Image (tube, grey):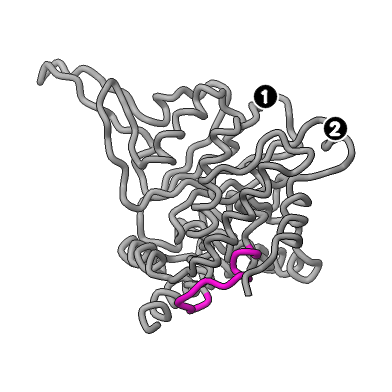
């Protein structure tokens, strides 16, 4: 329990640091850090100006590590992400010029503006922490984390992420608009200069790797493992769904729930932790049939209904 409290203190320190910039976003910060500590990747989908990019940059600035921001555009190529081998006439050999994927925290800004071919360049990196270039495999950093953003209301010049890519993200969530009071606080904070300019690192890469290791030590009972599988399995036979959640969703639920328990300083997962992240972990993996969409059903609503109907272990 002592180790859990120590590592939880690291997460709370980072959360407080981010909170200096992201006013009224405590829930989003909690989800972000749960995904980060749980070893998953995050997709932020929200309207312009809600702070998606700022949240990612503030997280990166809060940790003393390497951060790369990559603006996705229609003309972006896979080699612009992975890198390219260039012939060195001096040594008479090809040398790899590494791309921005070789980093610790990668911000894939407006990821749906790039072509499917370019989007797919991240598939191997996100799933296996390695990339294949010119027939050779290259390992990525132990601390490798992707935060992608996209705007849900734009369609011109965008390419929807395919189901395989959506499944690579452990969580998808929106920041939403803050309260009137918090928005006033945002205006006051940015009256002179942006508060992100005053953010300094409060944790190291070694701290985060320690946290990620401790997440695996958080206990989850066999009953709760069955509960997670039942939640995910229910999506595969739910009326109106063409595609349910994969076993990758079950794994993401376990790891993120463990991270939430660690965030709370606990050494075991509770049903509340699972229910808290069920929608962000499962909903983006579901595909509704046209009739369900036209009738007003949503993936989020379906997951909420499943959570309400699947019995909670006693």
202 left or right of 35? left
First along the sequence among labels 2 and 1: 1
Mark drawn on residue 70: none
- What quarter of the picture does the C terminus occupy? bottom right
Which numbered disc, 2 or 1, marks the residue closer to the eye? 2
**Residue at coordinates 57% horizontally, 35% vertically from top-left?**
111
Mark drawn on residue 157: 1
- Point out residue 83 in the picture as x, y percentages from the top left corner: 34, 28
Name the residue furthest left.
91
- Point out residue 66 in the picture as x, y percentages from the top left corner: 36, 51
**Residue at coordinates 72% horizontally, 64% vertically from top-left?**
187
Along the viewing direction, whichever of 42 and 114 lies nearer the viewer = 42
58 left or right of 290? left
- Point out residue 161 in the picture as x, y percentages from the top left corner: 61, 32
102 left or right of 149? left
Q: Which residue is mark 2?
A: 291
In three-dimensional space, the C-alpha distance between marks 2 and 1, rounded to whole angstroms, equals 27 Å
Along the viewing direction, whichever of 47 and 168 lies nearer the viewer = 168
Is 272 included in the stretch rendered in magenta? yes
Q: Magenta residues, as a range? A: 264-276
């Amino acid at each position: 329990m002592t180790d859990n409290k120590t590592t939880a203190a690291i997460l709370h320190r980072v959360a407080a640091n981010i909170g200096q910039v992201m006013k009224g976003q405590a829930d989003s910060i909690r989800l972000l850090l749960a995904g980060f500590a749980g070893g998953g990747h995050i997709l932020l989908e929200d309207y312009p100006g809600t702070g998606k990019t700022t949240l990612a940059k503030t997280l990166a600035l809060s940790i003393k590590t390497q951060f790369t921001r990559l603006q996705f555009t229609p003309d972006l190529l896979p080699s612009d992400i992975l890198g390219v081998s260039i012939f060195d006439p001096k040594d008479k050999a090809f040398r790899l010029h590494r791309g921005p994927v070789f980093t610790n925290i990668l911000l894939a800004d407006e990821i749906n503006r790039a072509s499917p071919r370019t989007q797919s360049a991240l598939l191997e990196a996100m799933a296996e922490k390695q990339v294949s270039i010119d027939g050779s495999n290259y390992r990525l950093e132990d601390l490798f984390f992707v935060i992608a953003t996209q705007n849900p209301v734009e369609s011109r010049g965008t390419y929807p992420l395919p189901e395989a890519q959506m499944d690579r993200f452990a969580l998808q969530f929106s920041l939403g608009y803050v309260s009137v009071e918090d928005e006033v606080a945002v205006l006051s904070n940015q009256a002179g200069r942006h508060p992100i300019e005053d953010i300094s690192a409060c944790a190291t890469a070694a701290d985060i790797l320690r946290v990620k290791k401790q997440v695996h030590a958080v206990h989850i009972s066999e009953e709760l493992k069955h509960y997670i599988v039942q939640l995910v399995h229910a999506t595969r036979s739910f009326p109106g769904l063409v595609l349910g959640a994969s076993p990758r969703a079950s794994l993401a639920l376990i790891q993120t729930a463990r991270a939430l328990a660690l965030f709370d300083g606990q050494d075991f997962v509770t049903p509340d932790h699972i229910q808290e992240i069920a929608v962000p972990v499962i909903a983006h993996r579901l595909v509704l049939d046209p009739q369900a969409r036209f009738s007003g059903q949503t993936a989020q609503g379906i997951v909420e209904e499943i959570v309400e109907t699947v019995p909670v272990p006693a």
